[in-house]
Amino acid sequence: MSRRRVAKKRQISPDPVYNSRLVHMITNRLMKNGKKALAYRLIYQALKQIGDITEQDPIKVMEQAVRNATPLVEVKSRRIGGSTYQVPLEVGPERGTALAISWLLTSCRNRSGRDMVTNLTNEFLDASKSMGNAIKKRDEVHKMAEANKAFAKYRF
């Protein structure tokens, strides 16, 4: 980490089909070993299935899923006087979105199922209804922060 200056925040370009920055962010997180075309194909097929199942705009469903999975607080370890405390901190909007996308894709990968497209579809649908593993993860983080609220005075 550089001590000189803060790195500039790069603007992410929207994806070519839906013209959405969120789809592009999810695609970049889904991509493995630089295979972006494969990641785009998986996302677009999942969005098509979401549209067929819900008969709504699939982008709105995905935005709702990410919004539901976004945490408000998180805990970070802080060492004070030989003890390590879990200090609750508020999460900024960019970090919250990044965590939500990460949790959604992790729970998709851990789901048992035939293929990634159905796992993506089911996880986004579950998260948009405030169910699923990503929502459980968010609730777990919130409970952890609530339990360690006494250490909020050690915020940095």
Image: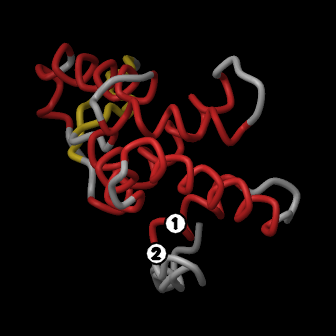
Q: Kindly indicate the quadrant of the structure image that contains residue 70.
A: top left
Q: Are marks 2 and 1 in contact (CB under 8 Å)?
A: yes
The quarter of the image holding the N terminus is bottom right
Percent x, y of residue 60: 32, 59
Against 152, residue 6 (above or below) is below
Image color mode: secondary structure
Left or right of 146 in this view: 70: right
Percent x, y of residue 116: 72, 38
Left or right of 130 in this view: 22: right
Q: Kindly indicate the quadrant of the structure image that contains residue 40.
A: bottom right
Left or right of 142 in this view: 104: right
Instruction: Kindly identify the residue that appears in the image at 12 percent across and 33 percent down.
Output: 153
SS at badge 1: helix
Query: What mark, if any, has residue 23 been given in the picture?
Result: 1
Instruction: Kindly identify the residue that appears in the image at 41 percent across and 23 percent down.
Output: 132
Query: What mark, if any, has residue 21 been given in the picture?
Result: 2
SS at badge 2: helix
Instruction: Kindly identify the residue that appears in the image at 48 percent across and 82 percent down.
Output: 19
Percent x, y of residue 34: 85, 65
Percent x, y of residue 147: 19, 13
Q: Amino acid at mark 2?
A: Arg
Q: Amino acid at mark 1?
A: Val
Q: Local crowd at mark 2 within 10 Å, few (<14), some, or many (≥20)?
A: some
